[in-house]
Amino acid sequence: MWSRRIEDLIPEMQTVAIEFLKKCREAGHDVVVTCTSRTKAVQAALYAQGRQPLEEVNAIRKTVGLWSLTPEENKRPVTWTLESKHVVDHLGPGTKLHKSRALDFALRGKEKVLVWNPKIDIDRDGIPDYDECGLIAEALGLEWGGRFKSPDRPHVEWIEKEGI
């Protein structure tokens, strides 16, 4: 399972995520949600990418309903952890932690094609657009993946707060 639904985020993050998308669009960025939640099995398949031989990666991906990768696509890892805040099946339905605490997004370019280049400056203001979106996320109280040790610019997540 892999979801793009805002409703699959913890309730506290749903409101902030909607505001994040709105403010990105107001700033001139065509932003789309690419992932909110996923199962451990999907996370494991994503983690295998770039770390295991292509045949093994594609076999794992097939079991979880993901498309096969090309040799070129399997050259680069797409996630750095098996313990993602996207993973929702660790405590089961009905528990608060069954909801995701992270959102991945992508920018669409002029031709409405997703653009993954972290340095892209579609609006030509001298600031990479993923960085602009990351600053918006931080202003709303989210943690931006662009500040991670291994930067993940199209990722934002809920910052745990006492009692939440």
Image (cartoon, helix red, strand yellow):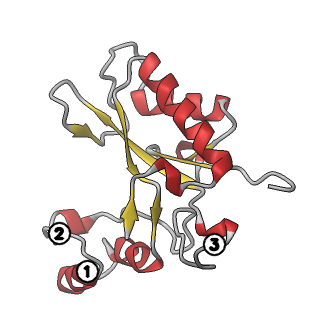
Question: Disc 3 versus disc 1: distance between alpha carbons?
Answer: 32 Å
Task: Point out which mark residue 38 bears.
Answer: none
Residue 29 location (% of width, % of height): 38, 24
Q: Are marks 2 and 1 in contact (CB under 8 Å)?
A: yes
Residue annotated with mark 1: 57
Instruction: Say which of marks 2 and 3 sits in front.
Output: 3
Badge 1 marks a residue whose secondary structure is: helix
Q: In this image, 154 relative to 60: left or right?
A: right
Q: In this image, 144 relative to 51: left or right?
A: right
Task: Point out which mark residue 69 bears.
Answer: 2
Residue 18 location (% of width, % of height): 53, 35
On screen, residue 37 above or below 110: below
Q: Amino acid at mark 3?
A: Gly
The residue carrying pointer 3 sits among few (fewer than 14), some (14 to 19) or many (20 or more) residues within 10 Å by Cα, namely few
Residue annotated with mark 3: 94
Badge 2 marks a residue whose secondary structure is: loop
Q: Amino acid at mark 2?
A: Leu
Residue 8 visible (yes or no): yes
